[in-house]
Image (tube, rainbow, N blue to C red):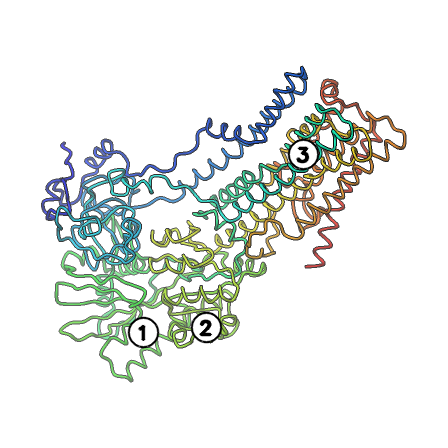
């Protein structure tokens, strides 16, 4: 079997020459030929951003300035024959590098895995049957079928098209869609003038086309553009703020450490001792791991959401989701099942069978296995048209049989503005399928009959049924033939989901192209509307200026018979009112509203254009998944604040303890090795666990993120409670020494209290709002394990002889341990009192 080579300048050749060169397959390639070509040509993929190697991630940790300081300090220790100091310093480097590597590798793994949740699909003709396959399996010579809103999966030469336009802005920079047709162009025509070509990565703006693939993978035009070879996620505003915040506080703390070193020398401490103390305090106090910790929290939250069928395309959405206050949602497929069933036929001038025949001929669907029984058909196309074809088949009207005696010579694709589609049958008869009220207005009907028909339709839609009108035109006269009634049941659990999100301050507003009667019936069933108010149509929207419409928005819940332009306008007006708006959409015309929204939510069954414009893709099309996404967004923001509060709550402890002791002329309460031991061997493990915290104050809406990393409550915990804890510990240290207790026991007690109180506090910080007694303290298993590991290490530091030698500690009796426990519980009490105080303020 020979493989055909794509000719030079295929846009300059007629269709016949292209087909002959690539392989003249009337029914497309055979599966055998396609498999062989795939082995030789490779998969249809572009090289993406390569995942960082393990060596790269390790080297990145070693480039940290603080790691360099530790390594230098370790070298100095060896030079001074301080081998124990050197061993601890190098062990600290190893632990820090290992934790940093684990965190960054975790984030890389999550972001890499997210790519597998969404795949581009293509409709391809093989063995005479149109199939839906992974676009990566396309090969040259494949005949593909494209419709509005679909992303072109490979470079292809147009074979046939109807009203075809492509958005090539991502390739050529041309902002307006380009008209496309099969006519060949000059061989030297630039990309922007090759109107008979479709390029992989661009979008079909309108129309339909059949095209033959002439290049895949790196051979596509996109494959030659360096911009698309590597696509790296830009830092989100929150990530940038954390990075800036970490640098600012690091600079401030480093200045304090330098001052601490100077005070130590001035008060008579040895240079060597103060050097190691300053290094230990700097390394422990500076929160250089904050940006990486944030990335892990974001990535872990995004991974949890992906497992629940919500794929975040941009990390920015993870931040904004938690602030969402309003959802503009579609009805069909989101609030309802999106699986219509034909329940009634109303023919006016012909039999029900004739009406059904006309209706199914006007559909634009593909039956992949037409020889099978109707109940086993695999149908590609719009949900409504699929329901029509299946329902007609159960009534004895099979589309494959009708297509044998009817030839479709022209198609008018459906769009949301005209609200109907059409076909020309046998070049003589036109059939239109769309909204019955729209078609009635197009037909030649007396005013009385028109009013009567519209009244009947209005009555039917009040029951929640969805109507599809059928009209025909022959010899220039357009006649309304009748309508079909479909029902789309509500999704299971949708009412509970809306109630749940409503109690947390998020309002749901329905924006649909459906008839107002249908929309009202659904809204009443869901509890969105009590009575008959709160509904407005697209026509009424057009009659209001922005100021007048904004006044009415708070009282409106349902927008019916709307266009994408209406949806975009609503997004902007709600935002002007201060709402943080999430918008759902699935069509190519929804893209402007999805881009304008604070969070654009595309349905998994929607077009590639909608997904490309969105921040979040809901794989299962369920409204409840949007609710889950918002709750996950809040959880992410909560976890970020918890991690910040924990990591910074003891940032000044070492400075207060060491500096205070020197000011009062007392022996240093902690050694450099003790400070490093607490920071890297005790406190590090709980800090990681906040990335996996599932508990969130889901009934509380976060304000729109404005660049402030910490809310008032978090700042109070860090700066007030943290400072009080440090001062209290210093006061206890001074009092115990003045009371005559042995210095080595007091020093061990101070070390134990210093190393354990943040472990206690980490359990209280699982929620910044709920009291600790309202939840299980072991609900976060990684955190519970981290606390146990930290406590075990601290106990070992006090009671293991070899660690006594290294850390200069002594075993403590039970009264001292009770004192350590009491100090930890006192810190928990301070956090809990803060929660109560701020709850009363709020």
Pick the quarter of the image with the C terminus. bottom right
Q: Nearer the viewer, mark 1 or mark 3?
A: 3
Pointer 1 residue: 437
* Of residues 772 and 200, the one drawn nearer to the viewer in this rendering: 200
Vertical order, 524 against 39 (above or below): below
* Of residues 386 and 683, the one drawn nearer to the viewer in this rendering: 683
Pointer 2 residue: 535
**Residue 450 percent location from the top left of the image:** 29, 80
Vertical order, 720 against 734 (above or below): below
* Of residues 474 and 22, the one drawn nearer to the viewer in this rendering: 22
Q: CA distance from mark 1 to mark 3?
A: 79 Å
Q: Which quadrant of the structure image shows residue 273?
A: top right
State the mark number for residue 258. Answer: 3
Q: Find out whether the residues at labels 1 and 3 contact each other: C-beta distance under 8 Å.
A: no
SS label for mark 2: strand
Task: Name the residue at 24% across, 38% down.
Answer: 219
Q: Earlier in the sequence, mark 1 or mark 3?
A: 3
Q: Earlier in the sequence, mark 2 or mark 1?
A: 1
SS label for mark 1: helix
Q: Earlier in the sequence, mark 3 or mark 2?
A: 3
């Amino acid at each position: 079997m020979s493989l055909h080579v794509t000719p030079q300048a295929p846009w300059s050749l007629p269709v016949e020459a292209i087909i002959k060169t690539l392989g003249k397959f009337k029914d497309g390639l055979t599966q055998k030929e396609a498999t062989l070509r795939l082995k030789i040509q490779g998969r249809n993929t572009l090289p993406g951003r390569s995942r960082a190697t393990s060596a790269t991630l390790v080297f990145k940790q070693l480039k940290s300035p603080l790691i360099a300081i530790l390594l230098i300090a370790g070298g100095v220790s060896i030079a001074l024959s301080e081998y124990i100091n050197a061993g601890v310093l190098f062990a600290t480097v190893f632990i820090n590098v290992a934790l940093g590597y684990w965190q960054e590798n975790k984030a890389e793994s999550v972001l890499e895995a997210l790519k597998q949740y969404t795949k581009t699909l293509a409709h391809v003709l093989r063995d005479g049957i149109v199939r839906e396959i992974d676009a990566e399996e396309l090969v040259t010579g494949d005949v593909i079928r494209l419709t509005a809103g679909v992303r072109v999966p490979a470079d292809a030469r147009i074979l046939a098209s109807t009203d075809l336009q492509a958005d090539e802005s991502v390739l050529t920079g041309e902002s307006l869609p380009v008209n496309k047709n099969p006519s060949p162009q000059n061989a030297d025509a630039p990309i922007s003038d090759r109107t008979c070509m479709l390029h992989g990565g661009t979008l079909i703006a309108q129309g339909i086309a059949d095209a033959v693939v002439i290049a895949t993978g790196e051979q596509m035009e996109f494959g030659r553009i360096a911009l698309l070879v590597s696509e790296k996620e830009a830092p989100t505003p929150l990530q940038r703020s954390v990075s800036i915040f970490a640098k600012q506080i690091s600079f401030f703390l480093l200045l304090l450490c330098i001052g601490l070193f100077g005070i130590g020398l001035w008060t008579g401490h040895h240079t060597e001792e103060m050097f190691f103390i300053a290094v230990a305090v700097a390394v422990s106090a500076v929160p250089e791991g904050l940006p990486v910790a944030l990335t892990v929290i974001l990535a872990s939250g995004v991974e949890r959401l992906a497992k629940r069928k919500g794929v975040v395309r941009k990390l920015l959405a993870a931040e904004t989701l938690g602030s969402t206050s309003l959802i503009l949602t579609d009805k069909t497929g989101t609030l309802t099942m999106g699986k219509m069933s034909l329940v009634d036929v109303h023919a006016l001038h012909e039999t029900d069978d004739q009406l059904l025949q006309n209706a199914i001929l006007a559909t634009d669907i593909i039956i992949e296995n037409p020889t099978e029984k109707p109940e086993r058909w695999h149908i590609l196309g719009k949900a409504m048209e699929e329901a029509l074809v299946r329902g007609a088949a159960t009534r004895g009207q099979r589309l494959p049989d009708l297509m044998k005696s009817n030839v479709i010579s022209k198609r008018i694709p459906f769009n949301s503005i005209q609200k109907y589609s059409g076909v020309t049958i046998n070049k003589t008869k036109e059939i239109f399928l769309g909204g019955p009220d729209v078609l009635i207005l197009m037909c030649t009907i007396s005013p009385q009959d028109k009013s009567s028909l519209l009244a009947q339709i209005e009555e039917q839609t009040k029951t929640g049924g969805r109507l599809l009108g059928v009209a025909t035109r022959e010899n220039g006269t357009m006649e309304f033939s009748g309508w079909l009634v479909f029902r789309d049941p509500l999704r299971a659990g949708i009412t509970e989901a809306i109630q749940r999100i409503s109690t947390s301050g998020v309002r749901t507003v329905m924006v649909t192209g459906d008839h107002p009667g249908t929309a009202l019936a659904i809204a009443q069933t869901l509890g969105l509307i009590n009575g008959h108010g709160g509904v407005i149509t697209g026509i009424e929207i057009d009659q209001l200026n922005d100021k007048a419409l904004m006044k009415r928005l708070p009282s409106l819940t349902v927008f019916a018979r709307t266009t994408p332009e209406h949806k975009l306008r609503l997004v902007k007006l709600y935002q002007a009112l201060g709402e943080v708006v999430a918008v759902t959409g699935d069509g190519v015309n929804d893209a402007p509203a999805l881009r304008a929204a604070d969070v654009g939510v595309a349905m998994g069954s929607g077009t590639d254009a909608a997904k490309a414009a969105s921040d979040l893709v809901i794989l299962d099309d369920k409204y409840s998944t949007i609710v889950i996404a918002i709750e996950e967004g809040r959880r992410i923001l909560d976890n970020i604040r918890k991690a910040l509060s924990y990591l910074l709550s003891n940032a000044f402890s070492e400075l207060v303890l060491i500096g205070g002791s020197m000011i009062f002329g007392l022996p240093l309460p902690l050694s450099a090795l003790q400070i490093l031991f607490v920071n890297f061997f005790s406190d590090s493990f709980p800090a990681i666990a906040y990335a996996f915290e599932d508990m969130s104050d889901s009934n509380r809406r976060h304000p729109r993120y404005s660049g402030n990393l910490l809310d008032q409550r978090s700042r109070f915990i860090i700066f007030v409670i943290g400072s009080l804890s440090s001062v209290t510990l210093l006061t206890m240290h001074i009092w115990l020494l003045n009371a005559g207790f042995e210095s080595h026991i007091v020093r061990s007690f101070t070390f134990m209290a210093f190393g354990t109180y943040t472990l206690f506090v980490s359990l209280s910080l699982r929620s910044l709002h709920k009291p600790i007694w309202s939840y299980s303290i072991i609900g976060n298993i990684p955190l519970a394990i981290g606390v146990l590991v930290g406590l075990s290490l601290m106990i070992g530091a006090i009671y293991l002889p070899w660690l006594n030698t290294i850390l200069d500690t002594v075993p403590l009796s039970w009264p001292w341990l009770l004192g350590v426990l009491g100090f930890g519980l006192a810190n928990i009490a301070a956090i809990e009192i803060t929660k109560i105080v701020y709850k009363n303020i709020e």
